[in-house]
Structures are given as structure tokens and as C-alpha cells.
Image (cartoon, rainbow, N blue to C red):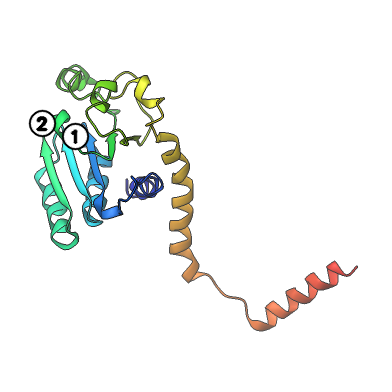
Amino acid sequence: HPTQVVCDVLTMIEHAPAGKKLEDFNVTFIGDATNVLSSLMLICTRLGMNFTHAAPKKYQAPAEWVRWAEENNKVSGGTLRITEDPVEAVRDADFIYTDLWWWVGQEDQIPERRAAFMPKYQVNKELMAKAPAHCKFMHCLPASRGVEVTDEVMDSPQSIIFDQAENRLHTEKGILVWLLYPRMKRPTPELLTYHRGKIEEFLTR
């Protein structure tokens, strides 16, 4: 989910804690090692942030992802921590992020996954209360309300999920411009002069 996490970083910058720079951010992801976790962990460590993943051992980031993140840290100065303790994971968090606990094709795993994550890894008001007061809640959406996160947290002033959703549009437009603008065919001076004349002719009618 590379475009998702670009919008996530933009949203974090918009809601940066007072006096903190990007490389000072503490980002905590609670839950399964999803594709979103993979991309988020890699972009955060690439940019020098302090990243924590809290999940049951079976659902933690695989060794290959950890290796990539640690390689990023050697260059950026970021940090990576993986733990089974969600309370410890959020203690210094500026942003708490979660994602779905199961996906299409994993229906047969739902009972096992629910038992592994609930209630210890649910983002609820009790867990948010263990984080600093300025901490913000993030989710890539769609969410399963009452499962990985409660309504109370999703609809709270600490939630910035709809800013994230809006920023997907802006960041994806930016990526398209970055990719396509250098390849655009530029008009010749003669063509510019021709169309400028047409516009001026129209405006003076």
C-alpha cells in the first residue's frame, strides 16, 4: 500500500505534535502484519521515525520486513521495536495506527484471530488513555467498528481517519504529477503564440 502510506505521512505532518520534526515522530501500529503495516513500517524507518509494532507473536512482522526496516534505520537513524505488549507500545506514541484483523479469504481463521487479538489489541479508550494526551488515532479504512477499534475512538477528537481519507486524493494527484509531468509533450513557441492569439481574439469580441 505505498500510496496509502504517503498520505499517512502527509496526515502526520499536518497533525505533528508541537515542536516535533518528522524524524522525531513515534508511530505505533497495533495489530496484524498486514500489507499496510509493511508499507508503513518501511516508510517510517526510511524517514527516520521511531516505529513500533505490537501484536501476538504469530501475527508480528516477518523477518524479511524487519531486515528491510533495519537497513533503513542504518541510513536514516530511525528505530524499530516489535513487542507483544500494546500498553508499552503506545506509552510514547504520537500516532496509533491499526488495521483489520482478517481479510477476504481468511474467513476460516476468524475465530482464531479474534481470540488472539481481542480484547488485548483492540484500540479503545483505555488503550488510548495509556498514550500521551496529544496522540492521534489513524486507520487506513474500511474499519470493522467494535472489532480492531471502538466507535468511541473512531469518532473521538483524537481520530484523524477522515483527514487520512481526504489526503489519499491529494497525494495520489501529486504522485501522478511527479510521474507524468516530465514526460508531457511541451508546446512549441509557435503553438503557444497561435493559441494566445486565439484567446486574445476571443476576449476582445
Q: Residue at x 16, y 35 (%)?
A: 89
Q: Residue at x 44, y 39 (%)?
A: 163
Residue 46 pos. (x, y %): 23, 56
Question: For the residue carrying disc 2, how many other residues have a C-alpha within 10 Å: few (<14), some (14-19), or many (20+)?
Answer: some
Give the amino acid at mark 1: Arg
The reply to whether residue 102 is visible in this rendering is: no
Give the amino acid at mark 2: Glu
Q: Earlier in the sequence, mark 1 or mark 2?
A: 2
**Left or right of 110 on screen, residue 163:** right
Question: For the residue carrying disc 1, how many other residues have a C-alpha within 10 Å: few (<14), some (14-19), or many (20+)?
Answer: some
Residue 18 pos. (x, y %): 34, 47
- What residue is disc 2 on? 84
Dot label at residue 91: 1
SS assignment at label 2: loop
Q: Measured along the vertical axis of the image, is residue 13 above or below residue 72?
A: above
Q: How many marks?
A: 2
Q: Residue at x 36, y 50 (%)?
A: 6
